[in-house]
Amino acid sequence: MSRQSILVVEDERDILDLVDFNLTQAGYRVIRAGDGLEGFRLARTERPDLILLDLMLPGLDGKEVCRRVRQDGELKTTPIIMLTAKAEEVDRIIGFEIGADDYITKPFSVRELALRVQAVLRRLEAEKAPAGPFKTEMLTIDPEKHRVTVKDEPVELTATEFKLLHYLASNSGRVQTREVLLDRVWGYSFEGYSRTVDTHVRRLRQKLGEAQDLIETVRGVGYRFKEED
């Protein structure tokens, strides 16, 4: 069985070496890139299972690489984890808005990084299991085709946004705490990352447009997908 491949795009050689060593030890095939242009080129030729992408890169920065990946028909569903020294919420929001699935700030522990990678890849494997479409009067979610429509108009979602929407819809009427969503959608429960859920829900609502009210906020608790009348 072929090993899962991870493209690491990082211009700091010591960090690149550290990530390469630890992910290789964990059993992954690591593809290395030292700048954004090389990273995007390798993404197109190697078709990695996941991309670890530094935000601050020479030539083509991480945000632009992420945009190009999401605009590429063959790569647009490839999960992306942003590596960044910036911990401010605005930088995380920008990353999510352009299509990143997760982020981790420097300095980071290699154990946490490995767990994040494992969680994202495990989640993608689980999503490959066949499941029938979920439908409301306005919204349709088709897991097999990885397709969402609102009033028959397609909605482009990242892999994480799709997983979040599908999980909420599959548990319609039941309140899901941020901690539960972190565990079930992201596959981890690191303390302090619950704001990640809020950012993704906000972005998801924007994309759903007229159907955004199907995701209800339960103040002080979490979120709930509205049951049909």
Image: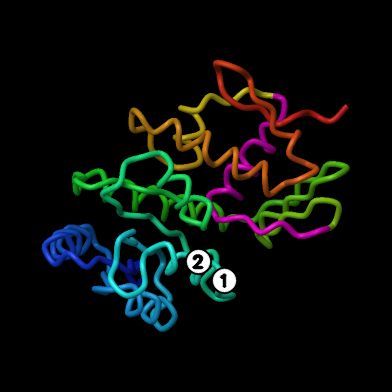
Question: Disc 2 on helix, strand or loop?
Answer: helix
**Quadrant occupied by the C terminus:** top right
Type of amino acid under label 1: Gln
Magenta residue check for 154 = yes
Measuring 39% from the left and 81% from the top, which residue is drawn there? 41
Give the image's coloring scheme: rainbow
Relative to 116, 228 lies left or right: right
The segment highlighted magenta reads 153-173
Measuring 77% from the left and 54% from the top, which residue is drawn there? 149
Residue sitting nearer the eye, 42 or 26? 42
In the picture, the disc for residue 71 is: 1
Type of amino acid under label 2: Arg
Magenta residue check for 105 = no
Measuring 40% from the left and 47% from the top, which residue is drawn there? 91
The quarter of the picture where residue 144 lies is bottom right
Picture coordinates of residue 213 (x, y %)? Answer: 75, 33
Picture coordinates of residue 142 (x, y %)? Answer: 72, 55
Question: Disc 1 on helix, strand or loop?
Answer: helix
Q: Which residue is mark 2?
A: 67
Picture coordinates of residue 75 (x, y %)? Answer: 51, 72
Picture coordinates of residue 83 (x, y %)? Answer: 31, 54
Residue sitting nearer the eye, 217 or 228? 217
Classify 10 Å Cα crowding around label 2: few (below 14), some (14-19), many (20 and above).
Answer: some
Residue sitting nearer the eye, 218 or 206? 206
Q: Are marks 1 and 2 in contact (CB under 8 Å)?
A: yes
Q: Give me the C-alpha separation between circle 1 and circle 2.
A: 6 Å
**Quadrant occupied by the N terminus:** bottom left
